Image: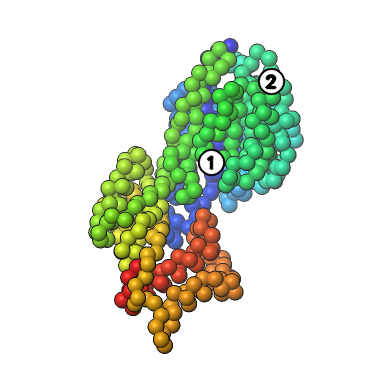
Amino acid sequence: MSAFSFVHAADLHLGSPLTGLAARDDNLARHLADAIRDAVRGLVDATLERGADFLVISGDVYDGEWKDHSVGLFFNREMARLGRAGIPVFVIKGNHDAHSVVTRSITLPSNVTVFGVRSAETHVIEHLGVALHGQSFADRQVPENLARDYPAPMPGMFNIGILHTSLTGRPPHADYAPCTLDDLRMRGYDYWALGHVHAFEVISQDPFVVYPGNIQGRNIRETGEKGAVLVSVSDGRVTELERLVVDRARFERLDVDVADCGDQNEILRFIESELRPLAAEAGGRPLAVRLRLHGETPLRDTLLSARQMLATECQAACARVGEDVFLEKLVLDLPAQQRTAAWLPADGLLDLEALLSEVANDDALVSAARGEIAQLAAKMPGGLLDAERPFGAEIDMLIDEARALLALRLGGES
């Protein structure tokens, strides 16, 4: 059996909108607008430059139905680049680009093989001694265990299983084509090329079961470097697994403890010093940072009551670190401290603390506010509401800001 190498990628999500970014920062949105297509170009470049013998894409080439044919033409053009170099491509469809979801199509170059949906198929690369087994999703929802019905391995060949799956569950990803690691091992394959989970993970090395992750982060839930894997094979076994980083923009989180900072200027200087290593790791790529300030500080009320101005200052701090460094969002996680007597009720005065607590616990009021915000959100670009923060947390945040502003106005301290 000859030595060879192949690239394993998944979850390209072509056509995926980077939702909500334009409303937060149009400059950031412009920098990220072409990132997914640029990452696909980077994937093809890496496949060519590393001399890989073939490319495997384990589902979700597209994010959904095409809005127009440009997304299909782009993928066609990039695969044709590989075709001219004699590099075959093997693709399965996942939940986002299932047969029933993406109804438009363009004839693909002859070097691209798309696995069918009726049952698992096997395609062979004779001169390399490779057998690839895979099945595309017919529909978005696939509750069945597809792996159990994959064909037996072909004797004397390096057998690769291609599957879009959540395994036994990979939160926050929804369950699709669920199966266990034992289900995969029972097939007797040498390598399982998985897709669906957007983080790089080697599930097993006996046999190799690998999620390459997606090739480009699209939001703050997809942080860090993104890419594919280069798999080297010799004498019928995997000898090396190398990460190929192809992303063209990056999302990161930064937690900054401001407990020891004496004033806002010191906070901003500290933020800059913490941002610089992240910018260096991004290697010149546009970098969108979710900044979380935490820790007990006497500056709490001042920071909360001037949140928007503080966010602007943090954006400026990002710009001082690098022209491609942007604030994705500012989160203030600053615990309240004991209030002074100036905040407590006296005869004839409202108990403001009790009033604010009553508002926070008023289910009818919260429900009404939820409805108003839902109507407003429906008229605005997607992605503005933070999927990571439940609505109740947003209400708590607003009440905290109101409490801080009132404390400053009344001369209280936090």
Residue at left 34%, top 77%? 342
Q: Whole-Å distance between the Cαs marked 1 and 2?
A: 28 Å
* Residue behind mark 2: 153
The residue most toward the bottom is 348
Task: Name the residue rendered at 66%, 25% in the picture.
Answer: 185
Name the residue beneath numbered marker 1: 198
Identify the residue at image location x=44%, y=36%: 246
Colour treatment of the image: rainbow
Q: Secondary structure at mark 2?
A: loop
- 204 relative to 317, above or below: above
Q: For residue 224, which quarter of the picture?
A: top left
Task: Give the mark, 1 or 2, whose residue is nearer the N terminus.
Answer: 2
Callout count: 2
Residue at (56% x, 24% y) in the render: 205
Give the structural element (helix, strand or loop) at label 1: loop
Picture coordinates of residue 25, whole percent (x, y): 40, 58
Whether residue 85 is visible to the viewer of this picture, yes or no, is no
User: Where residue 223 is drawn, which disc sits there?
Assistant: none
The quadrant in which the C terminus is found is: bottom left
Quadrant in the rendering for residue 118: top right
Measuring from the top left, give residue 139's x and y in whole percent: 70, 44
Residue type, label 1: His
In this view, 292 is above or below 396:
above
164 relative to 326 in the view: left or right: right
Side of 323 where 378 appears, left or right: right
Q: Position of residue 62 (x, y in %)?
A: 58, 43
Kindly tell me whether residue 343 is visible in this rendering.
yes
Q: Amino acid at mark 2?
A: Pro
Q: In the shown orientation, is residue 106 left or right of residue 338? A: right
